[in-house]
Image (tube, helix red, strand yellow):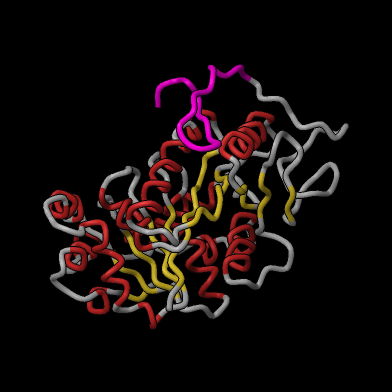
Amino acid sequence: MARVLAVANQKGGVAKTTSVASLGAALSELRQRVLLVDLDPQACLTFSLGLDPDALELSVHDVLLGRLPAGIVTRPTPDGADLLPATIELAGCEAILLSRTGREHALRLALDEVADQYDFVLVDCPPSLGVLTINGLTAADEVVIPLQCETLSHRGVGQLLDTVADVQRLTNPRLRVRGVLPTLFDARTAHGRAVVLDVATRYEVTILEPPIARSVRFAEAPGLGRSILTTASRSKGAEAYRAHARAIAGQDSGSGTGTTAGTGPGTGSGTGPGTGSGRGGPPRLPDGRLPAPPVARPPARTVGPGAAVSGAPV
């Protein structure tokens, strides 16, 4: 049976699609059989992998509504993974599903029919917490949360984790959070490092390492219909996604793992690359101290067991 990973964050522009395409290509390099699922009506993953969404007659829309099995709609991609593509019709699919019994299980049931043909299924969820994202989480074994390393980007993590808790309670008790993947990361800024630290301590989640550095190479790849592993194979971004793919596939040699914050700053442990004391975790100052957040935050409010988010409106 395939292992299903959902890549989700209700904020747009945090590299969900880039992460799915890059991880899919990296897993294919490891000779894993991979299926990518585009659950976003904007069809960015479909376009990024060389298909024209406007020219497709069949898409995941037909699969979710039970019109066709997933195997008929699936298309191969140049980077090795298969793709269940999306079109703009998927926007209307969400409204139709709302009136159906068991709407949260539509994707899971569809993937059950092809699960024995793949080792991994990666689901690119839309930037929302609607029924399509719930479908992705209900079908998944794990969820990866890409996080742009900026203050505004991490404010909704608590809301997403609340949604994950609801899915675990109501539709998918096996779902677990694999961790937060820092993206668009600039190690030169104290702000980026402080955001990663704050997310780890505030929500007690694993920070997946190495972070994905900001690079124009990621913006160039979709125009060629390929992933960065093809267009800039030796770039730092490509190597970082290869490290994460090895960790996901159980072929990890010490990178691509994460660190989890515990009772306070600096108490996390992990095997990923780090600085300071040599342990995994956010980069430290030359004297070994963790950097302080550059701005004061409003009072925290409790949103669930052991979790708090900024008191500012989300």
Q: Position of residue 66 (x, y in %)?
A: 16, 69
In-front residue for pair 81/66:
66
Quarter of the rendering occupied by the C terminus:
top left
Q: Residue furthest right?
A: 287
Q: Residue furthest bottom?
A: 117
Tell whether 79 sits left or right of 58. right
In-front residue for pair 51/24:
24
In-front residue for pair 171/103:
171
Instruction: State yes or no: residue 308 in magenta.
Output: yes
Taking the spot 54% from the left edge, 32% from the top edge, the residue there is: 150
Q: Position of residue 125 (x, y in %)?
A: 36, 53
Say above or below: 113 vs 62: below
Taking the spot 50% from the left edge, 29% from the top edge, the residue there is: 309
Taking the spot 54% from the left edge, 18% from the top edge, the residue there is: 299
Quarter of the rendering occupied by the N terminus:
bottom left
Tell whether 84 sits left or right of 142. left
Q: Position of residue 169 (x, y in %)?
A: 38, 51
Residue range in magenta is: 295-314
Instruction: State yes or no: residue 255 in magenta.
Output: no
Picture mark count: 0
Tell whether 254 sits left or right of 237. right
Q: In which quadrant of the rendered view does residue 201 lie?
A: top right
Tell whether 243 sits left or right of 284. left
Q: Position of residue 155 (x, y in %)?
A: 48, 31
Say above or below: 174 vs 202: below
Taking the spot 54% from the left edge, 52% from the top edge, the residue there is: 217
